[in-house]
Image (cartoon, rainbow, N blue to C red):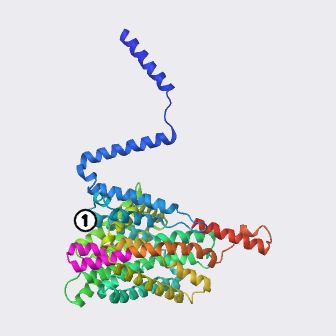
Amino acid sequence: MKMTASDSSCCSSCISLNDRCPQPQGLINLLVTKVCLFALLFGVVWSITGNECLPGGNLFGIVTLFICSVLGGKLVGMIQLPTLPPFPPLLGMLLAGLVLRNVPYITDAIHINTHWSAALRNIALSIILTRAGLGLDPSALRRLKAVCARVAIGPCVVEASVVAVVSHFLLGLPWVWGFILGFVLAAVSPAVVVPSMLLLQREGYGAEKGIPTLLMAAGSFDDILAITGFSTFLGIAFSTGSTWMNILKGLLEVVGGVVAGLILGLFLCCFPSRDQEDVVLRRTLMLLGLSLFSVFFSHVIGFAGAGGLSTLVLSFLAALGWKADKTLVAAMVGRCWDVFQPLLFGLIGAEITIATLSPSTVGLGLACISIGLVIRLLVTFLLVHFGGFNLKEKLFIAVAWLPKATVQAAIGSKALDMAREDGNKALIKFGLDVLTLAVLAILTTAPIGALGIGLAGPRLLARQVKADDTEGGAVSPSSHEIGQEKDNVTLESKL
């Protein structure tokens, strides 16, 4: 009985002491909790993997790169200049990988196996292609018809051809590798264009003539055309045998990819059925699983270009079969992209070693990019000439068709990965040149394109006035102009 009494008195004193002592709340409690969780996670992983999660290990390098890329994207996104839109976060992700690769001592601790790096980039490519297939809008294509086809096909093909010719004479690339580089650089970036177009559309700028819808729809087809051309010439570049056999193999990859995508897409339309539980989750897992399988299996059988086309076709067909339900699947695929986007851009930046870059390669590469962009601007302006747009709207469409980022990061290193597997030093050099120009294109055109859209949209596009805006009666011209200027500044800051 005495022991019980002492125990109860001890417990009561501990409880009273606990009530009297202040307990950490708010930010301090949150920080301590997160640090403890991180320490527990690290301890469990270290006990399983050993040196892999220590500095110099593969897992440590991947996690560190991911965290630095996320932080770099957040920091760049926070840069806000007066009356100017913020820079795209993907620039910070790319620069984070570039810094980790080229800072002394840090680069020794951050080691990522090339096979792991290539696999992670291929996963990100699969997710990008899946999102592109889900985002295709057949109704918008039917509405815009000819002008959408002209904007999607013309600038992409002309820029790819011009870059191929210029790079052949300036950089000494073979013709096939010139077209590989051309189609890498010819794709427009949906990561820059689509968010800006959605904001302009919501604010009413260019909505009356459907300019945001035109650019979003044409952007998807532009990317598909660029990836198709890239895959075709990539297959030709790594084929052995006569030229005609290589061309035939490239065409066979295109046809095989489309046929495989049709079969898998029709399968996804039927399985899983709508009466199953968690049908959205199961459809997402099936879609991503088949997309990853298509990309990786195409490498195994030697038809690397067929995997990307198969992924595009099967996701587009699945979206047609799912109809309105595709929005939920697209949202879940978008969450996967949020995870792999920092990895993709960080890994691309980490592939560039500044000390090994030749100044002539950088200078001539910038010349190739600049010539291709100038030709792209002129061709885009001419192709929308008969689309019913005025001069300001034509200028805006041409400017909005400049930024490059996502597709360049996804496919820019694919030729280098295949060259490393082949072991040919000449092909590795060509692959490094393609990757270097892809990174230069991202660093130069992504901020210029984003700023150009943000500044030109409110100034060059007519704003569609809503019914609520006209209920207040007549407004004096001076007050209307002042209000429009304020709206322009507000929209630029949002963009």
- In the image, taking residue 192 as reference, residue 431 lies left or right, namely left
- Nearer to us in this view, 64 or 8: 64
What is the count of numbered marks?
A: 1
Q: Residues within 10 Å of mark 1 (few under 14, many from 20)?
A: few
Quarter occupied by residue 240: bottom left
Query: Element at badge 1?
Result: helix
**Residue 283 part of the magenta-drawn span:** no
Q: What's drawn in magenta, residue-wise? A: 414-438
Q: Is residue 480 above or below residue 35?
A: below
Residue corresponding to mark 1: 115
- Nearer to us in this view, 258 or 353: 353
Please, what is the three-letter code of the amino acid marked with disc 1? His
- Nearer to us in this view, 132 or 122: 122
Instruction: Give how far across and how far down residue 65 sits, in percent.
Output: 35, 59
- For image coordinates 50% across by 76% down, the residue present is 217
- In the image, taking residue 32 as reference, residue 104 lies left or right, namely left
Instruction: Give how far across and how far down residue 231 sits, in percent.
Output: 32, 79
Asked whether the viewer can see residue 271, the reply is no
Instruction: Give how far across and how far down residue 79 sits, in percent.
Output: 52, 63
Instruction: Give how far across and how far down residue 14 sits, in percent.
Output: 44, 22
- In the image, taking residue 280 as reference, residue 383 lies left or right, namely right
Quadrant location, the C terminus: bottom right
**Residue 435 part of the magenta-drawn span:** yes
- In the image, taking residue 143 as reference, residue 440 lies left or right, namely left
- For image coordinates 49% across by 32% down, the residue present is 23
Asked whether the viewer can see residue 484, the reply is yes
Quarter occupied by residue 455: bottom right
What secondary structure predominates along the stretch shown in magenta?
helix
Quarter occupied by residue 132: bottom left
Quadrant location, the N terminus: top left
